[in-house]
Image: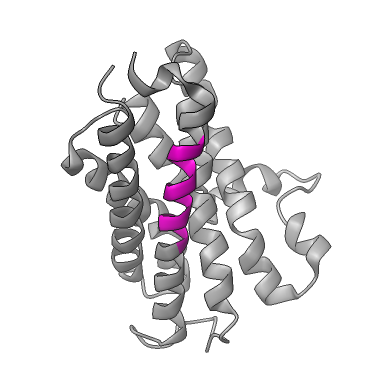
């Protein structure tokens, strides 16, 4: 059964490097914002240098959460794997965006509990805050079974499509929308390469 027959050790080797690469992608994308590569982000203004720290956390958790659930639920029935898809996106958005909220509000409690509120909005708002990235990446890795693939092209496509399409909603609202293509591609390529290396060196196909 390949690497999925040894969940504990391989889970660390899968998520650890991917989180590092995802954090690097988040850092690069934060630098794009800080350096105003596409000009000032409308309605946000100029970013302070601390956004560079927030970007590391943000990119790392966006990769780690869908990978964790993809690996953990790999052998579960299809109905179960489909059922948790929105939960994966919600958790990915909640954890990954803590650093961005802390950057804005400087209140640790408010930053951590930003999406954990007894309101109807708390159920769907996280999907506007990059939750769709988590949903899509989990979908490609687990539902489409790309996690165990040794084909680099599939991993790159999964990462880029998740990063680009998953953040398009966000960037369409904050402008400019085409930032999604740049940010999604950077994050997707780095994370995709990391997961592909894991599949090649520690496992193989099912």
- Residue at 46% from the left image edge and 22% from the top image edge: 82
- Judge left or right: residue 173 versus residue 108: left
Q: Is residue 195 magenta?
A: no
Nearer the observer, 173 or 109: 109
Nearest to the observer: residue 203 or residue 27: 203
Q: Position of residue 197 (x, y in %)?
A: 28, 42
Q: Is residue 124 left or right of residue 191?
A: right
Report x, y in % for residue 131: 52, 48
Query: In the image, 159: left or right of 5?
Result: left
Res 125 seen here: no
In which quadrant is the N terminus drawn? top left
First to last magenta residue range: 12-23
Secondary structure mostly seen in magenta is: helix
- Is 22 magenta? The answer is yes
Q: Residue at x 35, y 66 (%)?
A: 183
Q: Quadrant of the C terminus?
A: top left
In this rendering, position of residue 32 left or right of residue 125: left
Image quadrant assignment for residue 10: top left
**In the image, is residue 33 above or below residue 89?**
below
Who is closer to the viewer here, 148 or 173?
148
Which quarter of the picture shows residue 87?
Answer: top right
Please state which of residues 82 and 141 is positioned toward the viewer in this rendering. 141
User: Is there any visible trace of residue 82 in the rendered image?
Assistant: yes
**What residue appears at the point 57 percent right and 61 percent down from the top-left corner?**
57
């Amino acid at each position: 059964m390949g690497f999925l027959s040894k969940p504990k050790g391989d889970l660390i080797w899968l998520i650890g490097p991917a989180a590092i690469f995802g954090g690097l992608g988040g850092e690069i994308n934060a630098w794009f914002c800080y350096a105003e590569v596409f000009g000032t982000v409308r309605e946000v203004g100029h970013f302070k240098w601390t956004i560079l720290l927030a970007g590391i956390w943000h990119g790392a958790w966006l990769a780690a959460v869908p990978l964790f659930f993809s690996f953990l639920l790999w052998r579960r029935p299809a109905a179960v794997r489909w059922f948790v898809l929105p939960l994966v996106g919600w958790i990915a958005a909640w954890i990954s965006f803590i650093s961005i909220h802390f950057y804005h509000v400087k209140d640790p409690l408010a930053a951590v509990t930003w999406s954990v509120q007894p309101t109807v909005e708390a159920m769907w708002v996280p999907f506007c805050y990059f939750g769709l990235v988590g949903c899509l990446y989990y979908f490609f890795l687990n539902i489409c079974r790309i996690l165990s693939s040794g084909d680099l092209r599939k991993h790159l496509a999964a990462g880029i499509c998740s990063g680009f399409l998953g953040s398009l909603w966000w960037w369409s609202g904050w402008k400019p929308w085409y930032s999604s293509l740049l940010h999604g591609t950077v994050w997707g390529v780095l994370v995709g390469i990391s997961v592909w290396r894991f599949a090649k060196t520690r496992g193989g196909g099912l």
